Image: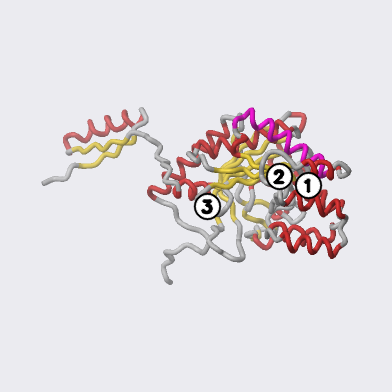
Amino acid sequence: MNKVIHTPEGVRDIYGEEFDERNELKRRMTEAIEAFGYKGVETPSIEFFDVFSKEIGTTPSKNLYRFFDREGNTLSLRPDFTPGVCRLAASHFSCEDGPQRLTYSGNVFVNYLSYKGRLNESNEIGAELLFDDSVDADCEVIAACCEALSMTGLSEFTIALGHSDILRGLIRYGKLSEDEEIVKNYITNHNNYGLFEFLDEKGTDEAIREIFELVLNHNENSSFDERLLELSKPYPLIRDGLKRLSDIYELLKLYGVAIHVSIDPGLISRFSYYTGIIFTGFAFGTGEPVAAGGRYDELLKSFSSEGPAVGFALFTDEVYTALKSKKISLARGRAEKVIEYSEEEKAGAIKEAMELRRSGTVVTIKRKCEE
């Protein structure tokens, strides 16, 4: 039998300096989230397949790692933390307990059909604020996300902030429900020409068509075109979504993080369980998002519970890539010392090393080379 020394495609070993730096990175982000009052939870890497089913609206089942237990139940490695945290919350908390602030850290597993440089196993750190449907809750999680990124040493990052009801409203009022995936594909691929040609073919109402145009051409500042606000008045989903974004941006100024936030009313999330705000974080040095999140007020119903919720995840691998590209140090700054000893000095060296370690110093002891 040949000895296996390589990892499968899509996973990798982490060791040495990189291991230490990643641990420091996770420590900084976790402590930043905990400073907002979030308490740690841990969910299993393995869940019943139904936790991530198509009806839940998470990762497509074709991208899940699936297998069976001894009783024949279909299981899955988690591709996403949020459904598992909702399952946990449905078992242990309720609206009567008041808002719950939960944070987590661990690996997720997505079996990408095409590798394209993406890892199938990656680390996430995130937070969920349950049983609070307020603008204040939305702002808190965005602020916590920004603070966690800032505490890593990143300063050049942007949170693109949108609202799922805007596109949902455009599809509903534009009578495009049967063509929802087509519309989303045009927007995701930034193919506005194809989209408007498609809308013309469908005979879409001129007002809806103009709202599409204003939404997709929004210039990423904090205010909306007056024409867009006027056109949206007859359409509650769109109108209320735009207002929620404006209210959130104003409140984020009090947190001091609005400088990192850019409103994007045409933003789309890859998860369909989002029902309110959605946001994605980007940073220089990586082509993939460093964070993502949103509101998912209906997800708890999938686990026989009920209540609003909002949360986010930080993608450790991408944050690390962004930091390394900017040459930002992840050194923890702990004092280090090496103690060399002869056989006669061994007892004293061990005693000294233990005392230093208990005071926070990293100590390595080694026997002196004999000449």
Badge 3 element? loop
Closer to the camera, 104 or 117? Answer: 117
Marks 1 and 3 sit apart, C-alpha to C-alpha, by: 28 Å
Which residue corresponds to the image point at 59% horizontal and 50% vertical from the top-left? 289
Sequence-earlier tag: 1 or 3:
1
Which residue corresponds to the image point at 75% horizontal and 42% vertical from the top-left? 225
**Which amino acid, mark 2?**
Gly
Marks 1 and 2 sit apart, C-alpha to C-alpha, by: 8 Å
Residue 236 belongs to magenta span: no
* Residue labelled with disc 1: 166
**Which amino acid, mark 3?**
Thr
Mark identifier at residue 162:
2
Residue 252 x, y percent position in the rendering: 65, 32
Q: Quadrant of the N terminus?
A: bottom left
Q: Main secondary structure of the magenta part?
A: helix
Badge 2 element? strand
Within 10 Å of disc 3 (Cα), the crowding (few <14, some 14-19, many 20+) is some
* Looking at the image, residue 189 lies above or below residue 162: below
Closer to the camera, 333 or 322? Answer: 322
**Which amino acid, mark 1?**
Ile
* Residue labelled with disc 3: 286
Sequence-earlier tag: 3 or 2:
2
The colour scheme is: secondary structure
Work out whether residue 60 can be spotted. Answer: yes
Closer to the camera, 157 or 84? Answer: 157
* Looking at the image, residue 192 lies above or below residue 269: below
Look at the numbered discs 1 and 2 and tell me whether their residues touch, using CB distance below 8 Å: yes
Work out whether residue 93 can be spotted. Answer: no
Residue 136 x, y percent position in the rendering: 71, 31
Question: Quarter-wise, where is residue 329 in the image?
Answer: top left
Segment tinted magenta in the rendering: 237-256
Residue 204 x, y percent position in the rendering: 86, 58
